[in-house]
Image (cartoon, rainbow, N blue to C red):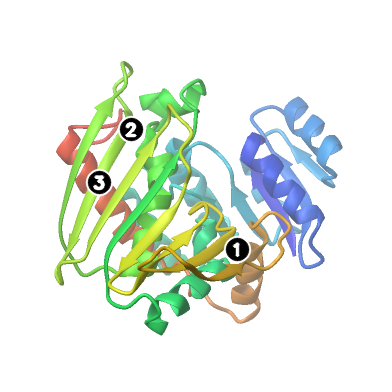
Amino acid sequence: MKVGILGAGRIAEVISNTLRAMAEAECYAIASRTLEKAQAFASEHGFAKAYGSYEELLQDPEVELVYIATPHSHHYECMKMCIRAHKPVLCEKSFTVNAKQAREIAELATKEQVFVTEAIWPRYMPSRNMINEVLASGVIGNVKMMTANLSYVIDHKARIVDPALAGGALLDVGVYGINFMLMHLGKDIERIESTVQMTDRGVDGQESITVTYKDGTMAVLTHGIFVRSDRKGIFYGDKGYVIVENINNPECIEIYDTNDNLIEKKDVPAQITGYEYEFLEAKRCLEEGKLQSDSMPLAETVYMMELMDGIRKDWGLVYPGEE
């Protein structure tokens, strides 16, 4: 599968490293805002083609899948371009800036019969099913509480703090905490409450989000851009608890009883980077003629964006250009 990438930043480097190690996909084309940058990237990472505009890459008949690696603020327009060019899309999280944009993309993709999915990598990893199997086994009993955190020292990065680029913790790292919760606790939510610390640029710097489910289960999620957190996800039951190391890219699952004795440790399968799973699923979907991913349907992406819209509304966080 020949992959083209829009954007030549850090995430494009990670994707390139992943593709080079895969037998099922290849680094074929890279597009950047200047031809010089694209050519330098192609030379360093082994791409066959380099383009100085996104439009040129989309006109290449050899491109079989497009990975969108631009800032959040550009995803919407990039996806529209891809869909109109009838190029299947894997779009880096956060899918769009808001739910309105996500719904429009879903409608356009359906109308044009083009495969589009959000590249939120934990959704595609084996760890997802591994965690759900542990919880369903009853080994820790009835789960009534969950905590998860994800925070990195990234406030020095321009795009992270720029409102014009839809910056802030929520759309960059908070999307992982919310996805982690939804994957393992579901969507039967009663209410969401949150506390936020805004930056001097007007985006969210760190937040605590408490989600209460209709059955009384509670999830507390914390995200930020100022400090390095332990990135753990923990499920608490009446017979023990489960610790997931690194909700961003789960490394292992540890099961404890109520006396803090380690019952079992499950390591996740060896991986290239973890991003390979989303490409493998996209390839399967395209081969089977599917227009959406089973692991991350567009309706689920829209739901995610709606949740984040609601949280931002409570904070009064509106990005430039939003209604």
Residue at 74%, 33% (x, y): give it. Answer: 38
Residue 293 appears anywhere in the view: no
| Residue 104, horizontal then vertical, whole percent | 34, 55
* Precedes in sequence: disc 1 or disc 3: 3
Report the mark closest to the observer, 1 or 3. Answer: 3
* Precedes in sequence: disc 2 or disc 1: 2
Crowd tier of the residue under label 3, counting other residues whose Cα lies within 10 Å: few below 14, some 14–19, many 20 or above: many
Q: Secondary structure at mark 2?
A: strand
- On screen, residue 64 versus residue 236, left or right, reads right
Q: Examine the rendered structure and indicate whether residue 69 appears above or below residue 118.
A: above
| Residue 287, horizontal then vertical, whole percent | 66, 78
Front residue (pair 140, 198): 140
- On screen, residue 209 versus residue 276, left or right, reads left
Which residue occupies the extreme top position in the image? 200
The amino acid type, in three-letter code, at marker 2 is Gln
State which quarter of the image contains the C terminus. Answer: top left
Q: Tell me the quarter of the picture where residue 321 sits.
A: top left
Q: Examine the rendered structure and indicate whether residue 245 appears above or below residue 312.
A: below
The amino acid type, in three-letter code, at marker 3 is Ile
Query: Which numbered tag is attached to residue 209?
Result: 3
Q: Secondary structure at mark 3?
A: strand
Report the mark closest to the observer, 2 or 1. Answer: 2
Inter-mark Cα distance, 1 to 3? 28 Å
User: Residue beneath label 1, please?
Assistant: 278
Query: Which numbered tag is attached to residue 206?
Result: 2
